[in-house]
Image (cartoon, helix red, strand yellow):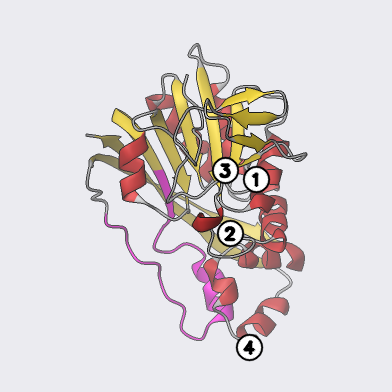
Amino acid sequence: MNGFICPVCGKSLEIKEKSYVCENRHSFDISSKGYVNLLLSGQMNAKLPGDNKMMVNARTEFLSKGYYSHLAQAVCDAVCVHFHGGVLLDAGCGEGYYTEEIFKAISGNKYGFKLLGIDISKFACAHAARRLKGQPQCEVAAASIFHLPLADGSVDMAVTMFAPFCREEFCRVIKSRGYLIMAIPAEDHLMSLKAAVYDKPYKNQTADYEVEGFDFLESRKISRSIFIDNPKDIQSLFSMTPYYYKTGEEGHRRLEALESLETEASFEVLIYKRK
């Protein structure tokens, strides 16, 4: 079953002791945190690309409390319907919350599988590898979604949760008749949070469901109201959104004054099949 390939020469990588090694003897050590760094220097736009330590810690703490468990369940349901073994890629796996839930959902089926998690943030990869520690079917790598260290047509299913989307790379690595499952914020996601912070809260843009190279199968709207009864979790939620760095001082002050918050947690799960 295919796994990661060498980002230098494109040959298959094999785990030998504590390294990934290709036939051309390019070697990549498995870090003490449990992931392998396959991100080449030319693929980085910063010294430490991706989510920083604070953002990863906030997301880990928030998601571990189950606020988005309805989304995790919906994604796992979709995966279990369409995945019948082989290679499953979580592209932009972040801290590994959804990756772990997917692993638990498919680990009881009769099909053999390999679950690969990729994220550009080394902090996120460390958390994901910790969640999946001791599971030989699971591997985590620091890599770019725009330069996936995977062979052409080697992936049976890819899942992407709020991550950047590179159509060309997904078309390249997902095999014909393979599946792509994408989770995106729905129009009204976190509207009450935005209303508490902004004078003019705005809805999220609606999705364009068409993706060249894929047949669109269905969209599932997943929504529920969540109640957050402590300021720390409110801050954690806000820091894991794009709004955190786009909000001025007044907005941050309003957020810090909140003792509790009830808001919409609304998503769309989009399912595609590779042509």
Distance between the Cα atoms at labels 1 and 3? 11 Å
Image coordinates for residue 96, horizontal then vertical, percent = 62, 42
Distance between the Cα atoms at labels 1 and 2? 10 Å
Q: Is residue 24 above or below residue 127?
A: above
- The residue sitting at 47% across, 54% down in the picture is 162
Mark 2 surroundings: few (<14), some (14-19) or many (≥20) residues within 10 A:
many
Three-letter code for the amino acid on which mark 3 is drawn? Leu
Three-letter code for the amino acid on which mark 2 is drawn? Gly
**Image mark for residue 38:** 3
Q: Is label 1 in contact with label 4 (beta carbons under 8 Å)? A: no
The residue wearing badge 4 is: 250
Which badge, 3 or 2, comes first in the chain's sequence?
A: 3
Q: Secondary structure at mark 1?
A: helix
Q: Secondary structure at mark 3?
A: loop
Q: Is residue 17 visible?
A: yes
Which badge, 1 or 3, comes first in the chain's sequence?
A: 3
Three-letter code for the amino acid on which mark 1 is drawn? Cys
Q: Is label 3 in contact with label 4 (beta carbons under 8 Å)? A: no
Mark 4 surroundings: few (<14), some (14-19) or many (≥20) residues within 10 A:
few
Q: Secondary structure at mark 4?
A: helix
* Pair 1/3: label in front: 3
Closer to the camera, 68 or 109?
Answer: 109
- The residue sitting at 57% across, 43% down in the picture is 38
Left or right, residue 201 beside residue 117: left
* Pair 1/4: label in front: 1
Distance between the Cα atoms at labels 4 and 2? 26 Å
Tell me which segment is drawn in magenta.
182-208
The residue wearing badge 1 is: 125
The residue wearing badge 2 is: 50
- The residue sitting at 58% across, 77% down in the picture is 196
Distance between the Cα atoms at labels 1 and 4? 33 Å
